C-alpha cells in the first residue's frame, strides 16, 4: 500500500540523529511541563513555540520543529498522570478521572503499579490512534480536496458549533468566547478591502494580534495567576518504579485487554471532536465500571479505573491531530497551538499539505510512533525524579514560568508591546478561568477567524450574495445543516426534556392513574 511506503519514508526522515535527540528533549521537557503546576500541554507548547522560529525556514527544519513540539505534547500527557496518582492533583482536565482510582492505589503503597498501568495504557491508546491516522489521514485529505469555499466555511461552522452545542460547560459562554476570538482575529488590515479594523490608531496593531502572543498569555500566564491566588501546597505519595514492578504490572494487563480496546475506540472516536479528550476519559471510565465484574470496587483502587481514562485520553489527544492535519481544524487546544505554529512557518494545514509537503506529513506521523515508544521508556525511568520536582516551592516555579513566557512573547517581533499584550491576555485568561469561560473556542476563532471570513466572502461573491450556496450541493448542505443542529442542540435538548416532563406529569394526573 502507498501509505506503508510513505510511512517508511517518514521513518527515514524522522530517524536522524538530530531528530531523535529532539524527541528525547521534547518528551523530557513535556513531562516536566505536565508535572509542574500552572502548566500543561497547550501551555507548554505555546510558551516554547518561539524556540522553533529559526527552525521553520526549510522543510527539514519544519519537520524537526513539529517533532519537538509534538513530543512536548506527548510528554505533557504522560506527566499529567504523575500528579494525578501521586498527589491527587489532575495535571489536565482529562486526568480528573485518573485520580478516582489512581490516588487510592498510591495510598495503598501501589503507586509504581498504578503509574506503570497508566503509562502503558496511555502508550496503547496513543499507538491505536497513530495507526488510525496513518491509514485514515490520506483518505480524509483526498476527500477534502473536493472542498470549495462553501464546503470550507461549512466545516469551520461545524467546528465552532461543536464547541457551542456539545462542548463542556455553558453554551452561552462558549458562544461568547468564540465571538471574542473572531473580534480579535479581525484586528488589523482587511484582506479584501485593505481597510484598517479595530487598530484604534496604534501602529503596533496594523498587522493584527499575533496568535502566539495571545496563547502564551491566555494559557501560560492565566494559569499562573490562578495558581498564585489559590496557593499550591503538595502532599503526595512516594514513587518508586523498578523493573520488577513494571514486569509484574505488565503481567496483569492482558486480562484487561477488553478495557483497553473499548477505551481506545472511545478515545479515537471522541478525539476528533473539540474538547473530546475530557469527555473520552470520563466516558471510558464509566463504561469500564459498567462492564466490570466488580463495579462497586471502582474508586477504591482498581487498575481498570486507571487504565481506562488514561488510554482513552491519550487516544483522543492523538486523534485530535487528524482533523488538524487533513482539514486544518484542530480537535483540541494543543492542536490549535500546533496549527498556529504550522501557519507561522508558512505551512497551510489541510488536504494540500499531503500533496505539497509529503516529507513533512509522513515525518510527523513516523515520529508519533517513535516518540510514544521513547516516551514510555522515559517516564518509566524518571518518575521519582519528576515527582521530586513538585517539592520545589511554587514561589520559585511561578517566576521562572513568567520570565520564560515574557521572553517568548518578546521574541515574536522583538517588541515590548507584545510583552504588555501578553500580560493583558494573561489577565483575560485568568478572568476566563475564574468565570469558567472556555479558552479553546476563543483560541480556535483567533486562529481560524481570517480563513472563516475569507471562505464566507468567497462563497457570497461566487453566489452573488445568495446564502443558498451553503446548501448548493449535498456535501455543503449536510455540513451546514449539521452545524445548525449542533449549535441549537442545547435548545433541542431542553425542548425534548420539557416534553418528557410534561408527558410524565400528564400520566401521573390522568384518570387511570388516579383510579
Image (cartoon, helix red, strand yellow):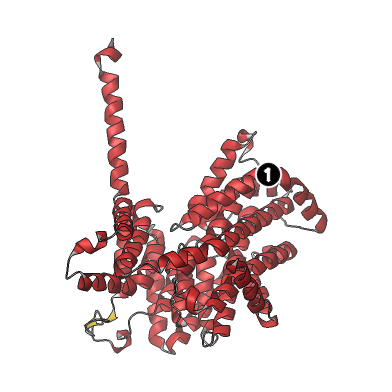
> Extreme right residue here?
244
Q: Is residue 62 visible?
A: yes
Q: Is residue 234 visible?
A: no
Query: Residue 182 lies in what quarter of the image?
Result: bottom left
Labels in figure, total: 1
| SS assignment at label 1 | helix
Q: Which residue occupies the foreground of this view, 76 or 399?
A: 76
- Vertical placement of residue 147 versus 413, above or below: above
Which residue lies at the image location 67% right of the left edge and 57% below the top edge? 119
Q: Which residue occupies the foreground of this view, 355 or 152?
A: 355
> Extreme top residue here?
515
Task: Give percent across and percent down for residue 222.
Answer: 44, 68
Q: Which residue occupies the foreground of this view, 280 or 389?
A: 280
Task: Give percent across and percent down for residue 504.
Answer: 31, 26
Q: Is residue 23 left or right of residue 400?
A: right
> Which image quarter is the C terminus in?
top left
- Vertical placement of residue 3 versus 307, above or below: below
Task: Give percent across and percent down for residue 421.
Answer: 38, 79
Query: Residue 502 lies in what quarter of the image?
Result: top left
> Extreme front residue here?
1
Would you name the residue on which mark 1 appears? Answer: 256
Which residue lies at the image location 33% right of the left edge and 53% below the top edge? 482
Task: Give percent across and percent down for residue 62.
Answer: 54, 81
Q: Is residue 457 left or right of residue 23?
A: left
Which residue lies at the image location 49% right of the left edge and 72% below the top edge? 338
Amino acid at each position: 500500500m502507498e501509505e506503508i511506503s510513505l510511512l517508511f519514508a517518514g521513518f527515514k526522515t524522522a530517524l536522524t540523529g538530530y531528530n531523535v535527540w529532539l524527541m528525547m528533549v521534547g518528551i523530557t521537557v513535556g513531562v516536566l511541563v505536565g508535572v509542574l503546576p500552572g502548566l500543561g500541554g497547550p501551555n507548554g507548547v505555546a510558551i516554547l513555540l518561539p524556540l522553533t522560529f529559526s527552525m521553520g525556514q526549510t522543510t527539514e527544519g519544519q519537520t524537526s520543529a513539529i517533532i519537538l513540539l509534538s513530543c512536548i505534547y506527548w510528554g505533557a500527557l504522560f506527566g499529567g498522570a504523575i500528579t494525578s496518582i501521586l498527589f491527587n492533583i489532575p495535571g489536565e482536565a482529562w486526568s480528573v478521572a485518573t485520580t478516582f482510582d489512581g490516588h487510592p492505589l498510591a495510598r495503598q503503597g501501589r503507586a509504581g503499579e498504578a503509574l506503570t498501568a497508566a503509562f502503558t495504557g496511555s502508550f496503547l491508546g496513543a499507538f491505536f490512534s497513530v495507526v488510525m491516522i496513518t491509514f485514515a489521514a490520506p483518505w480524509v485529505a483526498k476527500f477534502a480536496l473536493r472542498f470549495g469555499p462553501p464546503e470550507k466555511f461549512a466545516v469551520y461552522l461545524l467546528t465552532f458549533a461543536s464547541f457551542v452545542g456539545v462542548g463542556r460547560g455553558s453554551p452561552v459562554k462558549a458562544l461568547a468566547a468564540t465571538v471574542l476570538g473572531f473580534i480579535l482575529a479581525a484586528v488589523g488590515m482587511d484582506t479584501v478591502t485593505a481597510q484598517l479594523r479595530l487598530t484604534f490608531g496604534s501602529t503596533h496593531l496594523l498587522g493584527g494580534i499575533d496568535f502566539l502572543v495571545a496563547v502564551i498569555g491566555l494559557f501560560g500566564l492565566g494559569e499562573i495567576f490562578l495558581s498564585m491566588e489559590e496557593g499550591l501546597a503538595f502532599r503526595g505519595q512516594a514513587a518508586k518504579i523498578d523493573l520488577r514492578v513494571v514486569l509484574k504490572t505488565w503481567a496483569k494487563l492482558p486480562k484487561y485487554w477488553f478495557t483497553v480496546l473499548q477505551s481506545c475506540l472511545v478515545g479515537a472516536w471522541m478525539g476528533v471532536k473539540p474538547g473530546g479528550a475530557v469527555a473520552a476519559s470520563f466516558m471510558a471510565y464509566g463504561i469500564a465500571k459498567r462492564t466490570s465484574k466488580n463495579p462497586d470496587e471502582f474508586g477504591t483502587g482498581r487498575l481498570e479505573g486507571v487504565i481506562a481514562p488514561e488510554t482513552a485520553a491519550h487516544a483522543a489527544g492523538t486523534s485530535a491531530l487528524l482533523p488538524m492535519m487533513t482539514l486544518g481544524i484542530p480537535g483540541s487546544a494543543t492542536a490549535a497551538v500546533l496549527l498556529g505554529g504550522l501557519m507561522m512557518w508558512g505551512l497551510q494545514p489541510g488536504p494540500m499539505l499531503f500533496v505539497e509537503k509529503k516529507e513533512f506529513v509522513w515525518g510527523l506521523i513516523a515520529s508519533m510512533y517513535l516518540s510514544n515508544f521513547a516516551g514510555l521508556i522515559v517516564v518509566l525511568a524518571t518518575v521519582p525524579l519528576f515527582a521530586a520536582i513538585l517539592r520545589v516551592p511554587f514561589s520559585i516555579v511561578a517566576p521562572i514560568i513568567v520570565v520564560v513566557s515574557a521572553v517568548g512573547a518578546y521574541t515574536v517581533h522583538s517588541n515590548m508591546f507584545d510583552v504588555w499584550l501578553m500580560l493583558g491576555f494573561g489577565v483575560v485568561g485568568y478572568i476566563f478561568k475564574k468565570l469558567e469561560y472556555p479558552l479553546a473556542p476563543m483560541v480556535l476563532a483567533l486562529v481560524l477567524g481570517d480563513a472563516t471570513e475569507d471562505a464566507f466572502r468567497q462563497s457570497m461573491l461566487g453566489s452573488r450574495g445568495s446564502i443558498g450556496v451553503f446548501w448548493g450541493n449535498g456535501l455543503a448542505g449536510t455540513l451546514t445543516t449539521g452545524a445548525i443542529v449542533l449549535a441549537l442542540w442545547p435548545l433541542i435538548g431542553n425542548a425534548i426534556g420539557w416534553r418528557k416532563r410534561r408527558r410524565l406529569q400528564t400520566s401521573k394526573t390522568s384518570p387511570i392513574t388516579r383510579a
